[in-house]
Each structure stands twice: as C-alpha cells, then as structure tokens.
C-alpha cells in the first residue's frame, strides 16, 4: 500500500521554465491538496480539490495551476518558474471521516 | 485572520526529561486542532485530532490536550527516537479543507 506518491522527488529549473509535479493516492480519498513548505513559514496551502472535478485556491495560489485528473491523481503545474517558487512541495489526501491528512514524501524544487 | 503559533521554535531535552509543546490559535470557528510529526526529509505524519476544549488523546509517550485558546503536546520520558519537528494545525474558519499550520517545534532528545 503506497499511500501518496509524488514525482519527481528532486528538480532543478531555470527561471521561466515550466514543469508539472505529479501526485497519486491509492487510499480512495475524495480530497487532495498541494502544500509548499519553506523554512520558518510552515506548510502553506496552494490549491486543493475537495472532490473529483473540483479545485479551489488555497493561501498561496499565484504562479500555480492544478488539475484533478481523476480520483487518484492531482497535479501541480508551474507555467513559468520563479526563484520564489524554490521550496519543498507536498501532496496530501484526506479521509472524509477524520479529516486526517496523509502526505507524500515531498518534491524538492530549486529554481535558479 | 486564522493563525497558529507554536512555541518554542526548538527544544532540546535529555532522554527521560518530560516537557510540553504549545500551540495557540485564533479562536473563531475552530474545525479541529491537529498534531503532526515530521521527520527530516519526510512528509508530516498524523498524530492526533482534537475538537473540543477539555479533550485529551494519548499515543505512547505523547498526550495532546485542548483548551479554548491553545493545545499542548506533552511528551513524557522522551526517547531519542521522539526527535522530530512537531506541527500543529487548525481547521480553517471558513473551510475544514483549509488547514492552517504553525511553523513547528523542532525537538531534539539527547541520549
């Protein structure tokens, strides 16, 4: 049982390049999330998808787009990467009954 | 504005030395208070959810408590393997999906 799987685990981009972070969960959860984690700032919600077919902005959505491809998969796209987007990105899914978040292992992105 | 503040930022303990971590939060519209543990290079791992003042939950050496304005994570007789960053989060006032996280307490337990 893999839980939440993110790819890639590491990525280096140049300013202006684009990329997509992939996330898949095998726990049959309805809700999925993308967070970024920066030193001293905690986890901040970028976008979330309460259920298949819906997406909503979180606290820091600027510069990002998301796609809920199906119930299992939720991707995060950076159209034109900026150094301020250097961060560790976490995907998560949640159990509708408990609200408990299950996180992936993170994707470490550096934008030069 | 929803806010979560954790203290201290870092805590060093000797093995067996009990202590508490604090999480204070803005009061309005609380939809759950969550504790997570995060090991270096890993994603956070769920520990507890608390919903109402007076509620307590325990797991091994950890006990989480909740009042109307803050939550405590009590660590009794910690071991080196308890070393991690402990994150507190509250459910958002306008949406239970929008968890607001604190910046965490880095705990180091020395043998």
Image (cartoon, coloured by chain):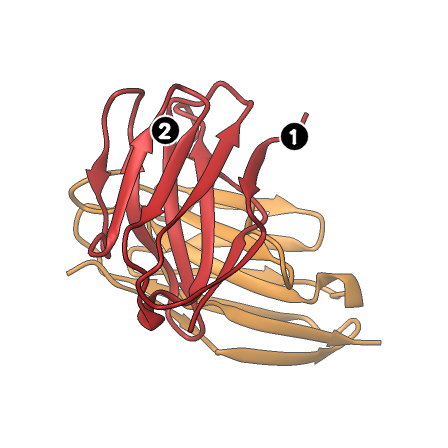
The answer to whether tags 1 and 2 share a subunit is yes
Of residues A44 and B74, the one nearer the viewer is A44
Write down the residue under mark 1: A2
Of residues A111 and A102, the one nearer the viewer is A111
Label 2, secondary structure: give it. Answer: strand
**Circle nearer the viewer, 1 or 2:** 1
Tell which subunit mark 1 falls on: A
Q: Which chain corresponds to the colour orange?
A: B
**Quadrant in which the C terminus of chain B appears:** bottom right
Of residues A10 and B78, the one nearer the viewer is A10
**Quadrant in which the N terminus of chain B appears:** bottom left
Q: Residues within 10 Å of mark 1 (few under 14, many from 20)?
A: few
Q: In which quarter of the image is residue A20?
A: top left
Tell which subunit mark 2 falls on: A
Write down the residue under mark 2: A31
Q: Residue at x 43, y 65 (%)?
A: A87
Q: Which residue is drawn at 78% across and 71% down?
A: B16
Label 1, secondary structure: give it. Answer: loop
Disc on res. A80: none
Residue farthest to the right? B111
Q: Which residue is drawn at 70% across and 55% down?
A: B61
Of residues B7 and A65, the one nearer the viewer is A65
Rendering colour (chain A): red
Is residue B72 shown left or right of residue B58? left
Q: In which quarter of the image is residue B77?
A: bottom right
Whether residue B23 can be seen here: yes
CA gap, disc 1 to disc 2? 17 Å
Q: Which residue is drawn at 25% across and 63% down?
A: B3
């Amino acid at each position: 049982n893999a839980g939440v799987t993110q790819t890639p685990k590491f990525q280096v981009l140049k300013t202006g390049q684009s990329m997509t972070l992939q996330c898949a969960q095998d726990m049959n959860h309805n809700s999925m999330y993308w967070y970024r984690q920066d030193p001293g700032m905690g986890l901040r919600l970028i976008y979330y998808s309460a259920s298949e077919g819906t997406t909503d902005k979180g606290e820091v959505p600027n510069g990002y787009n998301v796609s809920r491809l199906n119930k299992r998969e939720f991707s995060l796209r950076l159209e034109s990467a900026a150094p301020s987007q250097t961060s560790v990105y976490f995907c998560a899914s949640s159990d509708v009954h408990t609200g408990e978040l299950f996180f992936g292992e993170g994707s470490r992105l550096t934008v030069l | 504005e929803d806010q979560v503040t954790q203290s201290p930022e870092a805590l060093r303990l000797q093995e067996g030395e009990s202590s508490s971590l604090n999480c204070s939060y803005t009061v309005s519209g609380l939809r759950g208070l969550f504790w997570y543990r995060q090991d270096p290079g890993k994603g956070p791992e769920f520990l507890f959810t608390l919903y109402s003042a007076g509620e307590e939950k325990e797991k091994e050496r950890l006990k989480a408590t909740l009042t109307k304005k803050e939550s405590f994570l009590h660590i009794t007789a910690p071991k080196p393997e308890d070393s991690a960053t402990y994150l507190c989060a509250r459910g958002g006032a306008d949406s239970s999906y929008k968890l607001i996280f604190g910046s965490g307490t880095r705990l180091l337990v020395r043998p």
